Image (cartoon, rainbow, N blue to C red):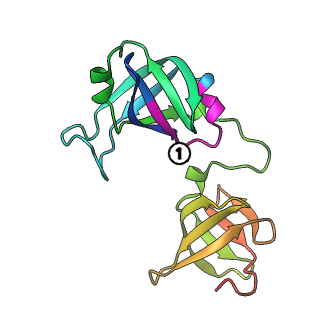
Amino acid sequence: MTEEFRVGVISSVHGIRGEAKVFITSDDPERFRSLKTVTGRFPKSGTVLRPGNAGVERVLELQSVRFSNGMAICKFRGIDTPEDMQKLRGMELWVDREHAIPLEEGEYYIADLLGLRVVTEEGVELGTVKDIWPTGANHVITVKQKNGNEVLLPYIPDCVKEVRLEAGEILIHLMEGLL
């Protein structure tokens, strides 16, 4: 199981007090209001805005949070100028499982589902979960098959019959027309 969850990415500087515009990657933007600290980490791979910072990590204490145009405007203690904040641009913000949003019965963290085997009711292994993304009405599961092809499945009760975290699999009903 995943022990940390990314809740945002510092996208740019906001204003003259060293605030950050944070692109929110959490399902619940309001969660930022209750966070005291986050772990800021530059990604080890992918697009790194400042080469040499990959993997650099630090604990950031949230001093204030407000929202504007779908972004969180965060003020971190000890970062008081735009120049200081500019150095953190591109940093991902993480929380540990203890500070993650509590789950309701039958809910799962997407990060815990990635990599699970996808098995049909007939016992046929379709592939593994590569990604899960929202589409508005419901989420869609991207399943990577052994031959390299990808299959998209709706994350709806008619298709996803059971999530078996302990067994490392998702049981699905393969609805007509999905393959």
Q: Percent position (x, y) of residue 89?
A: 33, 34
Q: Residue at x 65, y 31 (%)?
A: 30
Q: Percent position (x, y) of residue 107?
A: 73, 49
- The residue labelled by disc 1 is 2
The local crowd at label 1, few if under 14, some if 14 to 19, many if 20 or more residues have their Cα within 10 Å, is few
Image position of 89 (left or right of 152): left
Residue 169 covered by magenta stretch: no
Q: Amino acid at mark 1?
A: Thr
User: Which of 49 and 100 lies nearest the eye of the viewer?
Assistant: 49
Question: Which residues are drawn in magenta?
Answer: 21-32
- Quick one: SS at disc 1? loop
User: Which of 45 and 171 lies nearest the eye of the viewer?
Assistant: 45
Q: Residue at x 72, y 61 (%)?
A: 138
**Vertical order, 13 against 54 (above or below):** above
Point out the image quarter for the C terminus: bottom right
Image position of 86 (left or right of 172): left
